[in-house]
Image: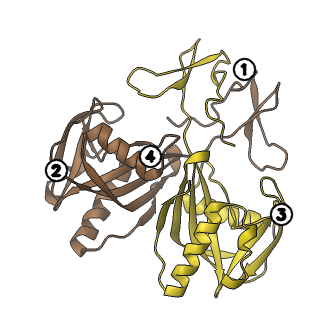
Chain colours: A yellow, B brown
Amino acid sequence: MFTPRSIRHCRACGAPTVYAVPVDDNRERATCTACGTIHYENPVNVVGTVPAWGEKVLLCRRNIEPRHGLWTLPAGFMELGETTAEGALRETVEEAGANVEMQELFSVLSVVRVGQVHLFFRARLRDTNFDPGPETIEAQLFAEHEIPWEQIAFRTVKETLQRYFEDFRRGSFGVHVADIG
Amino acid sequence: MFTPRSIRHCRACGAPTVYAVPVDDNRERATCTACGTIHYENPVNVVGTVPAWGEKVLLCRRNIEPRHGLWTLPAGFMELGETTAEGALRETVEEAGANVEMQELFSVLSVVRVGQVHLFFRARLRDTNFDPGPETIEAQLFAEHEIPWEQIAFRTVKETLQRYFEDFRRGSFGVHVADIG
């Protein structure tokens, strides 16, 4: 969850922090009043896939908040120790239990309001045996005309799906960089 | 700087944390022993540009550690409140004082060892008047055969430059996703 200026205590020593502009910097950072440690707050990455089976893509119905009950592409926060593609594959396994072959990067969407960057890769489903994890109510394949557009959980997922089907119809996939207000 | 498992105190209340796997999670996270706040640690993004002037690109000689005195493309940590492209443009202005028109995303390089993702955009220099900031000793244009390959500050910059000139020679630019060991 994105809560800027939420660092009230130092992670190193526990003393109170103040927001001040460090020397050689031009932004306020939480700075420890005791040991001087500077705490940076930066955007985080959400990584996921567009898992495709012929003309259909796999969506997951969310079993968790936010947007419980709505549909999403498999995606989640990138973790330390993995590449963007490894994180996207991990989330696809965790949320959909899907067996995919990773393909090219497809979308890079900055969501400034919440301090996130969403990166989706195309992926090819190897079969249609899905085994959704606890975060997912059900996983289901949808052709373009079947997509529940009004029940898509996130703007970045909707924009990625729209661009995906446009490119699919054209028969050529690009990399889409956009800004989600 | 990347220091995993460095959260010893809670940012909310200052009490000590322990690393433990939260309910509904599968990784150890710093968890507050008093208020229960969970502290996530995730990769951060470095954003920059490949500023081009004809067949040449602009490099900056670093006036800061690490890699003081070595050459880099203008780049730095993405901040809250900006898109990937806005961050890349900001760094190009801050480090090189260059006047550029932003172009397409060019490289997305996961640097797992340090918990970073580096994103470089191509950019077109509008003129050759550079005004480097305090982080830069000098900014200079280099054709491919002039690049000081042995004095490049970072692997991601070297890989981006190599791919850039390959694509430049071919006359067609792609988006390059790679993993830097």
Which label number is shown at residue A69?
3
Asked if residue B137 can be seen in this view, the reply is yes
At x 73%, y 39%, the residue is B29
Type of the residue with mark 3: Gly
Check disc 1 and report its element: helix, strand or loop: loop
Label 4 neighbour load within 10 Å: few <14, some 14-19, many 20+: many
Instruction: Estimate the spatial distance between the alpha carbons at disc 2 and disc 1, rounded to whole Å.
Output: 51 Å
Label 1 neighbour load within 10 Å: few <14, some 14-19, many 20+: many
Residue topped by disc 2: B127
Type of the residue with mark 1: Gly
Instruction: Estimate the spatial distance between the alpha carbons at disc 3 and disc 1, rounded to whole Å.
Output: 36 Å
Please state the chain letter of the residue tagged with numbered disc 1 in the rendered image: B
Contact (Cβ within 8 Å) of mark 2 with mark 1: no
Instruction: Estimate the spatial distance between the alpha carbons at disc 1 and disc 4, rounded to whole Å.
Output: 29 Å
Residue B180: x %, y % from top left: 45, 55
Residue topped by disc 4: B46
Type of the residue with mark 2: Asp
Residue B2: x %, y % from top left: 53, 37
Q: Nearer the viewer, mark 3 or mark 1?
A: 3
Check disc 3 and report its element: helix, strand or loop: loop
In primary-sequence order, the first of circles 2 and 1 is 1
Q: Nearer the viewer, mark 2 or mark 1?
A: 2
Contact (Cβ within 8 Å) of mark 3 with mark 4: no
Asked if labels 2 and 1 share a chain, the reply is yes
Which label number is shown at residue B14?
1
Check disc 4 and report its element: helix, strand or loop: strand
- Return the residue nearer the eye: A122 or B111: A122
Please state the chain letter of the residue tagged with numbered disc 3 in the rendered image: A
